[in-house]
Image: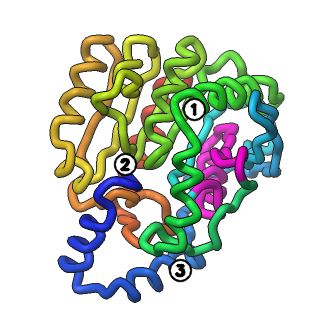
């Protein structure tokens, strides 16, 4: 996960690539400034706005983007540990252009409005970790579930969301386990979920997200980074067994050559080919499960 073994994996990555830490940091800044995602084929015109969602713990700032006309399946996006920022707005907009009403949330709203880091900052920088880790550690299974309930309820109240269709949810890094808690909290509403380099999906704790699978009715995509799998090779098998026992379709795959954090386009380890493949698999899942 973002806070587990990060330095070891980063040093291994730098050794393999021959890149210096300074160059790695500079690459992160460049990716943040230049991150551009391809538009969806037959992209729809969209409307976008900053919104505020009331929760039991306050008011969350978020980004809402949806096709300019009509009602569509809603999707809730949980960002990675660096929070809501321009790259996640771009990803939300891209998904909306494919025909979904998308809410991208700031998980740290209790402490700080988004963005919580400068554009282009990376987790490799100690200054970034000093900002992010206290925010990350302020969240837990309870806040995940109460936030999920507030955000799902808000989405269902929007005219741009078709309540006759199931909702989807997707999450990156720390957002991966939050998708599982969301799917378990709303089994009748969440029809599909996707975790990208999610951390902590399987733990030895009584609140491990994988233990929630029997409460879900969502079809799943679990896209695993190669180095995450090397750290926890049994996690994918535990997940496969859990979804099979619940008779829920789940595509669980290790993405060869992909480092933890490979999907957001502002990441220094962004792997465009594998990120595009994972995005495509997610679109197939949403088309099938949210129809």
Q: Is residue 41 magenta?
A: no
Q: Quadrant of residue 74?
A: top right
As measured in the structure, the alpha-carbon distance from the residue carrying label 1 to the one carrying label 2 is 18 Å
Q: Secondary structure at mark 3?
A: helix
Image-based side of 41 in relation to 278, left or right = right
Question: Residue 197's mark?
Answer: 2
Q: Earlier in the sequence, mark 1 or mark 2?
A: 1
Q: Which residue is mark 1?
A: 144
> How many marks can you see?
3
Residue 143 x, y percent position in the rendering: 61, 32
Depth check, mark 3 against mark 1: the one in front is 1
For disc 1, the neighbor class at 10 Å (few under 14, some 14 to 19, many from 20) is some
Q: Earlier in the sequence, mark 3 or mark 1?
A: 3
Closer-to-camera residue (56/150): 56
Q: Magenta residues?
A: 83-111
Closer-to-camera residue (65/117): 117
Q: Which residue is mark 3?
A: 29
Give the residue at x 17% y 36%: 234
Determine if residue 161 is in view. no
Q: Is residue 92 magenta?
A: yes
Determine if residue 72 is in view. yes
Residue 70 x, y percent position in the rendering: 78, 33
Give the residue at x 44% y 32%: 285
Q: Quadrant of residue 20?
A: bottom left
Give the residue at x 67% y 45%: 105
As measured in the structure, the alpha-carbon distance from the residue carrying label 3 to the one carrying label 1 is 30 Å
Q: Secondary structure at mark 1?
A: helix
Give the residue at x 50% y 33%: 179
As measured in the structure, the alpha-carbon distance from the residue carrying label 3 to the one carrying label 2 is 21 Å
Residue 284 x, y percent position in the rendering: 43, 36
**Where is 285 relative to 61, above or below?**
above
Q: Secondary structure at mark 2?
A: loop
């Amino acid at each position: 996960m973002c806070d587990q073994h990060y330095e070891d994996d980063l040093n291994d990555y730098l050794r393999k690539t021959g890149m210096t830490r300074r160059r790695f940091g500079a690459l992160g800044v460049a990716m943040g400034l230049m991150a551009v995602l391809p538009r969806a084929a037959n992209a729809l015109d969209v409307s976008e706005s900053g919104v505020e969602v009331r929760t039991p713990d306050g008011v969350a700032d978020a980004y809402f983007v949806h096709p300019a006309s009509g009602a569509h399946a809603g999707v809730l996006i949980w960002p990675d540990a660096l929070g809501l920022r321009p790259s996640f707005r771009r990803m939300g907009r891209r998904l909306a252009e494919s025909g979904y009403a998308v809410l991208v949330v700031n998980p740290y709203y209790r402490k700080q409005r988004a963005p919580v880091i400068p554009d282009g900052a990376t987790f490799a920088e100690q200054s970034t970790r000093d900002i992010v880790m206290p925010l990350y550690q302020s969240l837990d299974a309870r806040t995940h579930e109460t936030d999920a309930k507030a955000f799902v309820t808000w989405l269902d109240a929007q005219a741009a969301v078709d309540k006759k269709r199931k909702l989807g949810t997707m999450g990156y890094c720390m957002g991966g386990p939050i998708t599982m808690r969301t799917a378990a909290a709303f089994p009748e509403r969440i029809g599909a979920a996707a975790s990208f380099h999610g951390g902590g999906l399987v733990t030895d704790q009584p609140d491990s997200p994988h233990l929630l699978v029997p409460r879900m009715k969502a079809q799943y995509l679990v896209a695993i980074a190669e180095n995450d799998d090397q750290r926890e090779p049994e996690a994918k098998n535990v997940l496969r067994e859990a979804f099979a026992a619940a008779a829920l379709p789940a595509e669980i795959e290790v993405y060869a050559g992909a480092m933890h954090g490979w999907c957001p386009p502002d990441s220094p380890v962004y792997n465009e080919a594998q990120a595009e493949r994972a995005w495509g698999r997610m679109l197939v899942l949403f088309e099938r499960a949210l129809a």
